Amino acid sequence: MARGARLCLEPTAMTDDATLTTRRQDLDRLLADAARHQAEHLEITGYGIRELPETLFRIRSLRSLTIFEQHLDRLLERLFDLTQLEKLVVWTADLHNLPGAIKRLERLEHLIIYCGSYNRPPKDGIIRKEDVSFNRLPPEIGELCNLKVLDIKHTALRDLPDTFR
């Protein structure tokens, strides 16, 4: 496997327990390979996860991480121990606010967060941006001296912290 890893499984129309188990096993294999080969780039897309797996946090070589998982609703503080990250992209339906631990990503140049993103839209419609949980940035975001791109869409965010101005 090259230093970048990408495996994308398209969500099926029917998501039963067996399908979810198979997708999670595929993700476990992907992450094990990425850790073994010290991947620098990783995309996690369409596995149906609700939280980031522990194995991800062992891939300390990651410079670029893209996550497109509609059921993921929070980024655990352990994610911000991946201090080599230069680019973090998160597409999900709804996301809680970022923890102040984001300041540990001192090399981060690109932070992209799109809420209202779905692998497969729900029957009851797409969440309105006013209803998205993400409504503030932590003041610690202003400590990211290398940040060049901050792209946040479809959230309830209305203002930037004073430390960012």
Image (spheres, rainbow, N blue to C red):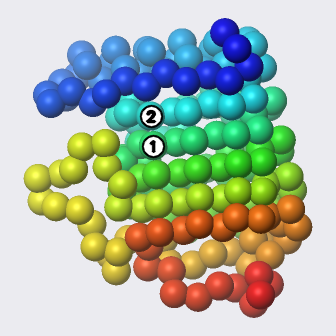
Q: Position of residue 143 (x, y in %)?
A: 85, 71
160 is higher (above) or lower (below) than 152? below
What numbered label is drawn on residue 18? none
Q: Which residue bears the numbered disc 1?
A: 68
- The three-letter amino acid code for the residue at tag 2 is Thr
Q: Is residue 159 left or right of residue 80?
A: left
Q: Position of residue 69 (x, y in %)?
A: 41, 42
Query: Residue 124 is drawn in which quadrant?
Result: bottom left
Which residue is at the front of the view, 105 or 58? 105
Along the polypeptide, which appears first: circle 1 or circle 2? 2
Kindly state the secondary structure of the residue where label 1 is placed. strand
**Which residue shows up at 47% across the image and 60% down it?**
114
Assess disc 2: are there few (<14), some (14-19) or many (≥20) residues with their C-alpha within 10 Å of its C-alpha: many
Q: Position of residue 127 (x, y in %)?
A: 27, 66
Q: Are marks 1 and 2 in contact (CB under 8 Å)?
A: yes
Judging depth in this view, the residue of 115 and 138 nearest the camera is: 115
Instruction: Using residue 30 as the reference point, say whether residue 124 is left or right of it.
Output: left
Q: Is residue 58 visible?
A: no
Element on which disc 2 rests: strand
- Is any atom of residue 94 visible in this view? yes
Marks 1 and 2, how far apart at CA: 5 Å
Q: Residue at x 81, y 30 (%)?
A: 61
Q: Residue at x 59, y 66 (%)?
A: 151
Q: Residue at x 77, y 87 (%)?
A: 165
Q: Is residue 60 left or right of residue 129?
A: right
Depth order, front residue of 154/25: 154
Report which residue position mark 2 lands on. Answer: 45
